[in-house]
Structure formats: structure tokens, C-alpha cells
Amino acid sequence: MRPGGDGHRQLTATMSHFQQKSSIGIETRHRLDRHHRAQQHHGFVQLRSTLVAHRHAGHRRRALPFARNGGEPPNDEVHSKGNLRGRRRLVDLNNAQTACLSEDAYYAIEEDIRVASETLFADFELTTEVDVDPSRRVVELANVTIADASNIGKAHFFGGIVRLAAHDFMDYDPNDASGGSQMGQDGCIDWEHPANAGLPGLWCDDCALTEIYNVYAGEPYFLSRADFWVAAANAVMHITSPEGEKLDLAGTFRFGRVDAETCEGSALRLPESGSCSEVERVFPRMGLSWTGNCNDDRLPVISTCAYLFDLPFADATALLGAHSLGRGDAKFSGHHGIWANSEAESLVFDKRYYEEILRRAWIPRNLDDDSIPQDWTWGGAGNDEDDAIATRADGGGDIVLNLSPRFMLNTDFSQSPCQTYEAGSERDEAAQAVVRFADPRSAVDITGPFSNNNQPFFDAFAVAWEKATTNGWTNLSTLSEACVPDASPSQSPSANPTKNPSTKPSFPPTNEPSLGPSSSPTNHSSSPPSAKPVSVPPSTNPTNNPTNEPTSVPTAEPSRTLTLAPVSSGDCKDWPSTFAVAGKGDKDCQWVGTQDGTFVGPGSKKCKKAEFHQKCPETCNMPCGCVPKNEACSANEDCCSGNCRDGGKKAGTCGNELFG
Ligand code: HEM
């Protein structure tokens, strides 16, 4: 292969994920991120042509703007001139708030991501010319198959998208008293911080993912980054979950989050990989549980654990199962390898992560090298660290790891029964959740073999994911049937009442977005100096309540009681889609039960677990109803605008009375 040639660049683009094992500073990481972006560009040009071809082949339901400039790379100047209707410069999107997201668009995002993953990582060629290191043991690249290399790149692309969404929400702190912000899923990442190393290579002006976002950043959607990152992660989990057990999170997806301009200190709130206590520091702070303890004071008010299909509320344990996907990189976190057992498995979102925890005899790794964070691995063919290392001979100095050693972080083990925990302690309960999710066939030997049933994990993950991605937001909207393109691209949706039916942040007014400098090294999440902040305090946010009657949106300190005042207009009465519970954050309407049309509190009636997954709020004075899986409650505003879609006859919309 010719150095600098297409095949070489393409290989390097992927292999750049796997470079540099030694301790590296922020400077080096930034250099590598820039390098990665440059390399990714090549793959992206190819991606764009494929997306265009794909569309021409009739696979798309809508026009893709990639085709309009002849497949040329994205160009900020073109965007800024506004000559591409429906597209806006990313820099204009601060404080962006989604106006509308239709089900079609939601699944179109998924299709874009699938096509991108197949295109970017389709044809890998392998080279030996970059992989000789005088200071390290040289390995045979023949160990790596083309399929491995392709899978590595693809899994990292998929994994990176899920990690991006998680790093956005793991900074949530509802009780922030430092004058800062509650943060959470707000489209803001501290790109400069080493905790986020690697992510700038995924989200940059020329990155494939960002280009996909650009399609939806304009009318009629005006999709916020925050909403897009969640939709993109949902797409990844849908694409990569096993056939026949697809995890489709469309039913619980909500849009309407407002992007934040800055999120200073966000990275400090993210968990470090060093110890169990990091899990305990971060997830309870976010209002998420770690364990399956139904009596845990931090858990939502519900009648019994059985509400969640007898699953424990193991939010954190469930969320960490996302590590079945993707990998760690020596050059980013220092933790190198995969949680799964093979590159192919690291492409699959399933319960294997828990199986791996249970079935291996894990041993500490990197104990002798202070520059590499200690983690865990297991002995076995191809899993030896030295066998996995080679470096460049071209003077570049970047270390390339060719294989994927299997590893676990200390935080992964925080839930593992491999350590001895006091019976009944939270950690012990988390360990039990690991067993529950892994689902060993025998209760006697939890090290396997395991069932093929991902459902316990998926059910718990879906609940935890919904909580994590909506934390701090109220009145987010479910997917619409269609979006009408009548908004001006120059208008922020948050300033346009007709395009902003019901979304408002739950942040107290004192936590309005600030105008501080962006923390992003690229311009996609920063404000131009002249930009005005578009703050959306609850009182000024347009709602579906034309009479401006008080709404139930919690805006101040949480109280010990539920906030229940319905949004009403004339005869039409909508329960708020969320309500506040003291110390427990905002709960979605799925927790609301009704009896004879009267609200009686959370969990009072339950939907049949097999067929239904949530209840609609009471709308149009009709009783609350259960919604079949993969469907969502219809939007409240449809009712209060006198536009109840089908008179309540259709399952999943107003008036459906299918209680379990
Ligand atoms: C205690 C909490 C957590 C810790 C300490 C942690 C740590 C890490 C580390 C060190 C990496 C490797 C990054 C790299 O080197 O590129 C990683 C990757 C990843 N994390 Fe986490 N993580 C945590 C929670 C989560 C959560 C809640 C999710 C999602 C629900 C998640 C999803 C992922 C994914 C998918 C990857 C693979 C990324 C890729 O392939 O590029 N993590 N995590």
C-alpha cells in the first residue's frame, strides 16, 4: 500500500483511534484529536457520496443536503450565507431548541448513522509499513483480519456516539449551589478536558456525525444538539442490538432540550474510572440509583419494585452495560481494549458486558506503569498486553495497538461479585443486578453458561436511559407525526411560540444560560461574540396554555409534595407531562395514574407489562391510557389546541383505556 494513498489514509483514520499507549498530556491529546479529524475527512467525502447514492437509489424519505453542493465537503461560509435553505451554520445554533421532530425524521437519523457506519468502515486494507517500533516488541499484523479492523472502527464510531450522549448527561447536578448550572443533557461538553478525549474527533465541523446533524439543524426541525445526541445514541442501540431483540427507544424519546452555550466545570462532574466510589458519587447525584434497593430514598416514588417488571432499579448498573459497545483507547483514556470478547462483539449492544464480568478470572493490569491507569484484564490467547503493541516506524512516534485486549475498569467492577461486599449493601445489590442482567442458566453457577435473553438488561437500561437523558427537563415532547416546515431558519425556535409547544427547562431562573465563552475547540457549540442569550425561563416560555394560567412546571426548590396543577384551557385539561417529586427529580407522566379520570398519584394503575410500556397523561378530560410498546403518548398540546387527533379511538392516543 502506498503511504499517503487512499488505502493508507483510511487505515490510519481508524488506527488513529488506537494510537499512543504512553502517558500523554492534554496537548498531545489535542494534537491527536486534530489529526483524527483530518483523517476522518477523507472517509467522510466517501460517506457523503454513499449517502447521496443511497438516496438516489430510493432508500430515503427526504432530501439530503449533501447532494446540493455536489458532494463537496461542508463549508461554513456557504452555510453562513444562508443559501442552503434549511441549513444553518452550527455556530448559530447556541441555545437551539428543537421545534419539532417527527417519527420519520427520528428514524431517518438512524438510517443516516447506519449508512455512515457502513461507508466509513467498509473497506479496510491493512499495511505493515507503519507498525514497527524499535522500543517495543513488534507483532505480526497478520493477527488482525480485515474484518477485525473494520469492526474496530465501526464499533468505535457507534460507541463514541453513545459515550457522547452519556458525557453530556453525566454532569447533571440538580442541587448545584455553586452559582453554576444543573447541566445534564444540554448539548454541552467540555471539549478541552481530558475526560472527554476522543469525543472532539467524533463531533467536529467535518465529522460524519456532525454532518448528519446539519441535515436536521434547519427547518422544520431545528434540532438541538442535545436532542440529536440522544436520538443518535438511540439509533446506535437500535442498530446494534441483536436481531429479534431490537432495543427501540423511540417510544420513550423526548425532544425539546435547549442547548447550553457553556458548561464550565462539566467534566469535573464526570465519573473517573478509578474506584467504586465514583459510581456512588455521580449516579445518585443525578437522581439515579445504583442498586436494586426498592427502599432507597433516592428512588422515584412508586408502589412496588414490581412496577418495573420485577426488575431492580439498578440504573447505574444498567447504564454501564453500554460498555458492551465500543472500546477504550490508549491515547484517550489510557484504558486500552474492549469490554466484549471480540471486535465483532464490541459492535453489539447486548448483555455480554455482564457475562464477561462474571465468566472471567480478572487480574489487575497496568500495575507497574504509573502512566497508565490501573484496570483489569484476563489471561488468554491474544489478550496479553505485549502481544497487542506495536508502534510506528515512520518517526511519527504514535503507538499503535493492533489487537484489542479485553479489560474492565475499576468502576465496572464496582458492581461485580468478584469482590466481597457486605450482604445487603448497595454494592452487593448492584452485584446481584449484574447477575440478573447476565442471566446465567443456572442459579448455582453464575459464571455461565448464560441465556440469550437480553430483556432484563434492556428493560432496566431503557428506564435508566430515559431518566438520565431527560434529567432536569420538563414538558419535553414525544415524536410528532409530521413537522410542518413553516419556521424561518433565522428564527430561534425558542423565540417562536408556534414552533415551541410545550418545552421548558426545569432549571431555576437563576440558572439561565450564560454568555461565557464556549468550551468547545470548534465553533459548533460556541456563540459568536455578538450573540444574544436566548434564555428560556419557565415564565416566558410559550406553552399550550393561551390564558397563561399557572402551569405545574417545577421552577423552584423541590417540595415534598407532587406538583399537580393541570394545564387547562376551557374544557380541555391536560396533565403536565412531568411532575416534581421532592428530592427525586422530575418524573415523567408514565408514573401518573388515574382512577375514574381523577389523578390519584404515581403508580396507582399499571399497564400490562408485556404489551404496554407507559401511560398517557389525562388529556381532554379523557381517562389516562396505556400505550403499546414502541408507541408514545400523543402530545398534550394536540388536545388543548382542540385538535384531538382521533377522538381517542386509536390505541396510544387520547382516551385509550387499555389498563392492565
Ligand atoms: C462510572 C461511569 C463511567 C466510567 C468511569 C466510564 C469510563 C469510560 C472509559 C475510560 C472509556 C474509554 C474512553 C476512551 O478511551 O476512548 C469509556 C468508553 C465508553 N463509555 Fe463509559 N464510562 C462510564 C459510564 C458510561 C455510561 C453511563 C455510558 C452510556 C450509557 C458509557 C458508554 C461508553 C461507551 C459506549 C464507550 C465506548 C466509546 C468508544 O468506543 O469510543 N459509559 N467509558
Image (spheres, grey):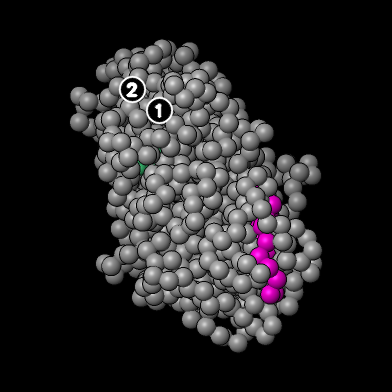
Where on the image, by quarter, is ligand 1? Answer: top left
**Compared with residue 4, is residue 552 higher up or lower down, i.e. above or below?**
below
How many numbered circles are shown? 2
Q: Residue type at mark 2?
A: Trp
* Of pointers 2 and 1, the one earlier in the residue sequence: 1
Neighbours of disc 1 within 10 Å: few (<14), some (14-19), many (20+): many
**Compared with residue 595, is residue 439 higher up or lower down, i.e. above or below?**
above
Where does the image place residue 461, in percent across and percent down from the top left? Answer: 51, 44
423 or 563: which is nearer to us? 423
Neighbours of disc 2 within 10 Å: few (<14), some (14-19), many (20+): some
Q: Are marks 2 and 1 in contact (CB under 8 Å)?
A: yes
Q: In the shown orientation, is residue 489 left or right of residue 196? A: right
- Disc assigned to residue 357: 1
In percent of the image, x 68 and y 79: which residue is there?
572
Q: In the shown orientation, is residue 394 left or right of residue 77? A: left
- Magenta stretch, residue numbers: 620-635
Q: In the shown orientation, is residue 509 left or right of residue 93? A: left
Q: Residue type at mark 1?
A: Ile
Can residue 27 be seen here? The reply is no
Residue 629: within the magenta? yes
Can residue 348 be seen here? The reply is yes
User: Which element carries disc 1, helix, strand or loop?
Assistant: helix
Q: Which picture quadrant has residue 546?
A: bottom right
Where does the image place residue 26, in percent across and percent down from the top left? Answer: 28, 44
Residue 628: within the magenta? yes
570 or 535: which is nearer to us? 570
In percent of the image, x 55 and y 55: which residue is there?
228
In percent of the image, x 56 and y 64: which residue is there?
592
User: Which element carries disc 2, helix, strand or loop?
Assistant: loop
Q: Which residue is mark 2?
A: 362
Q: In the shown orientation, is residue 210 left or right of residue 520? A: right
Where does the image place residue 157, in percent across and percent down from the top left? Answer: 51, 38
